[in-house]
Image (spheres, rainbow, N blue to C red):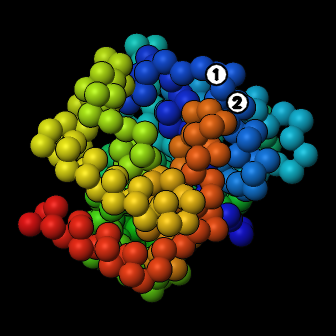
């Protein structure tokens, strides 16, 4: 697959009522956001069965009805729930296949373009789950298979069964752990990397303020994230002001600068960018063809180094 530098993420539009929700969302605005992203040239949408406990996938399916040039659809398995809506982990063959079939139905498609194991849990089931992923590909229910949140050691275990085509790890200016070992390993192994949370769940968009962070809805998971609490909150907002300054030089938003930073390494094929309405999508889609120069990267690197010292 040839993917655009950014893809639309649908975690937030899953809505409220589950453990990692972002609070109540407007479904009509979510559908408009998906369609607007496709209109603006985004050619892949990343979702997961667990987002809104199936709701995000349903919205993606509804949004794509009647669209002429359908984007690639990526989704994930491994996080399951029951009647009590409590989330658990399963990578048994039966569970993986059942999840795939349910995702196909919610999305309204015959084949998933990229199917990913969401988390490597339970770890003792990785081989069983990955073997079933390979069978799903052989059966034509999915076109490509990848993983999310895996270590290189876990990918090696999976690769002994069938090739790992993609990795989806978290990556942003404030979460750089993958630079040490994972990115070099993926480069050497020829594994495609699509990163999530390049704007750290909205922190680096330029629209987050201290007041907004302190007044996030009670059912917004970010209320319990240390990056949205002091002392990190004020520190992070100072970084946003630097991104705002750099963005102004190019007519770009702070969020677009944050996304472009994650794309500076060629091993990163794409970044997943969330959007809950058309305006949010329009505010970050420009990152697809925007790149920072060496001086600007140096400014950001120096600032981040000072934050951690």
Residue 8 rendering spot, x and y as whole percentages: 61, 48
Q: CA distance from mark 2 to mark 1?
A: 6 Å
As drawn, 244 above or below 192? above
Q: Which mark is residue 27?
A: 1
Circle on res. 263: none
Residue shown at the point (54%, 21%) measured from the top left: 25
Q: Residue at x 89, y 36 (%)?
A: 66
Residue 129 appears in the rendering: no
Name the outermost residue toward the left: 309
Q: Are marks 2 and 1 in contact (CB under 8 Å)?
A: yes
On the image, the x and y values in percent for residue 172 come to 37, 59
Mark 2 neighbour class, 10 Å CA radius: few under 14, some 14 to 19, many 20 or more: many
x and y, in percent, of residue 180 in the image:
27, 76
Residue at point 58%, 68% (across, down): 290
In the rendered view, would you say 217 is above or below 165?
above
- Residue 31 marker: 2
Pinpoint residue 108: horizontal percent, then vertical percent. 77, 34
Front-lying residue, 297 or 60: 297
Q: Indicate the secondary structure of the residue bearing disc 1.
A: helix
């Amino acid at each position: 697959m040839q993917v655009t530098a950014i893809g639309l993420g649908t975690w937030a539009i899953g809505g409220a009522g589950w453990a990692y929700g972002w609070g109540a969302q407007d479904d009509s605005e979510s559908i408009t956001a998906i369609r607007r992203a496709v209109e603006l040239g985004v050619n892949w949408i990343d979702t997961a069965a667990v987002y809104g406990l199936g709701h995000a996938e349903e919205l993606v399916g509804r949004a794509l009805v009647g669209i002429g040039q359908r984007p690639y659809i990526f989704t994930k398995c491994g996080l399951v729930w029951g009647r009590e809506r409590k989330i658990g982990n399963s990578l048994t063959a039966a569970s993986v296949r059942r999840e795939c079939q349910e995702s196909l139905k919610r999305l309204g498609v015959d084949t998933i373009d990229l199917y990913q194991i969401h988390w490597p849990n339970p770890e003792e089931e990785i081989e069983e789950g990955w073997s079933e992923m390979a069978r799903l590909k052989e059966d034509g229910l999915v076109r490509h298979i990848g993983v999310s949140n895996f270590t290189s050691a876990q990918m090696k275990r999976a690769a002994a069964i069938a090739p790992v085509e993609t990795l989806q790890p978290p990556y942003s200016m404030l979460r750089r752990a993958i630079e040490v070992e994972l990115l070099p390993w993926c480069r050497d192994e020829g594994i495609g990397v699509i990163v999530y949370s390049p704007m750290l769940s909205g922190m680096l968009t330029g629209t987050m303020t201290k007041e907004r962070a302190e007044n996030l809805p009670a059912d917004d998971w970010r209320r319990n994230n240390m990056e949205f609490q002091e002392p990190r909150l004020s520190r992070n907002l100072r970084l946003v002001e630097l991104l705002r300054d750099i963005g102004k030089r190019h007519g770009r938003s702070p969020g677009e600068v944050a996304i472009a930073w994650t794309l500076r390494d060629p091993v990163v094929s794409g970044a997943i960018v969330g959007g809950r309405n058309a305006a949010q999508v329009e505010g970050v889609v420009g990152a697809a063809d925007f790149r920072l120069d060496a001086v600007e990267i140096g400014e950001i690197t120096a600032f981040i180094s000072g934050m951690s010292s």
